[in-house]
Amino acid sequence: MTTPPVDIPDADRRAPLPALASIAAVAGFQLARLLTPPRLALAAIGIVFPTAVLAAAVNGIGTSIEPRLGIPMLYLLIPEMVCMLGLLVTMSPLVADELERGTWVHVAVRPGGRRGLLLGTWLAAVIWSGAVALAALALAILSDCIEGGARVAGTFAVLILLSCMGRAALFALPAVIVPKRALVASVGVALVIEYLAGLIPAVVNQFTVSLRLRTLLVAWTGLRRDIPAEFQLLVDINRPWYQVSAVLVLTAVFLAIAWAILEWRQFPPSDES
C-alpha cells in the first residue's frame, strides 16, 4: 500500500529569502516600529535643536557666525550629537529588545536569521538617524546662521553618512554582548572609545570613527590652517580617501565581530512569569 503524497503548503516550498531580502525585511520592520509619536517627537527635537543653538549664538553676537567658528559648531551639533543620540536610541535597544523578548528563538532557526536581525537593524538605525541628521542639516543651512553654510552641505552629508554607518556598527557590539544593559553599555562605549580614546594622540585613536570624521572635516572645509599647532595631533595626516576607507573597514570589522558573537553565543528565551 503506497503512502499518499503529503500536501506541502506553498510557503514551505519556497526557498529561504535571499540575504538582501531578509535584511531589507528586518530593516522595514524596525523602521515601522520607529514611526510612533514618542519617536517622532524625539526626531523633531533632534531636527530643531542644532538650529536653535546656532540661532541663540547669532542672537548673542548680532550677526551670522563666521565659518571658522560656525563649521566646528555645526559638526559638533549634527554629525556628533544628533547622529550619536539617534543611534543610541535605535541600534542597541532594537537589537537587545529582539533578543530579550525571545524573538531570537524564531530568528535563530531560519536561514540567515541572525545576519538579517543584525544587519537589518543596523540599516534601519543608519536610515533613521541619518534622515534626522540630514533634516537638521538642511534646517540649519536654510536658517543662514553660518556664513556660506550652503558650501559645506555636501561635506556634512558625507560626514553624517559615515558617522551613522560606523557608530551604528560600533553600538552593535554592546547590544549582543550585554543585551540587558545595551543602552548603558553603548553610552559607555561612546564616551570611552569615541570621545576619550578618540582624543588621545596614540595608536588607540586609529580605531575610532571620530578621528576619521575630524580629519575629513578639516581637510574638506579648509580648517586645517586655522587649527593651532597643539591640536594638530587630533587629526590624521593621511588623505581623505584613506579616512573614508578606514570608516568602511571599521564598520565591517565591528559588524563581523557582532555577527560572530551572535553565531556562537546562546541566547535563552525570555523568563516566563
Image (cartoon, rainbow, N blue to C red):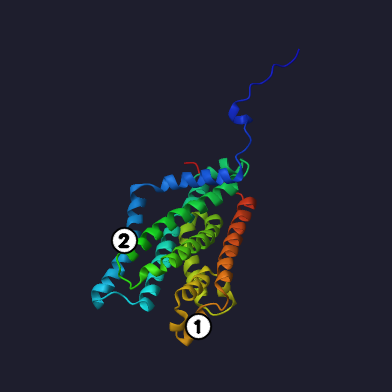
Q: Is residue 188 left or right of residue 11?
A: left
Instruction: Describe the element under mark 1 as helix, strand or loop.
Output: helix
- Disc 2 marks a residue whose amino acid type is Val
Q: Which mark is residue 48?
A: 2
**The one of 199 and 142 positioned closer to us in this rendering:** 142
Left or right: 92 with respect to 5?
A: left
Distance between the alpha carbons at the discs numbered 2 and 1:
32 Å
Given residues 193 and 139, the one toward you in this image is 139
- Report helix, strand or loop for mark 2: helix
Which amino acid, mark 1? Gln
Residue drawn at 37 percent across, 58 percent down: 135
Q: Position of residue 273 (x, y in %)?
A: 47, 41
Q: Position of residue 86 (x, y in %)?
A: 42, 58
Taking the spot 49% from the left edge, 75% from the top edge, the residue there is: 219
| Residue labelled with disc 1 | 232
Q: Residues within 10 Å of mark 2 (few under 14, many from 20)?
A: some
Q: Nearer the viewer, residue 63 or 118?
A: 63
Give the quadrant of residue 6. Answer: top right
Q: Is residue 81 visible?
A: yes
Task: Indicate the position of residue 65 as horizontal and vertical percent values.
Answer: 31, 75
Q: Residue at the right extreme?
A: 1
Q: Which image quarter: residue 207?
A: bottom right
Residue 54: x and y in percent read 31, 70
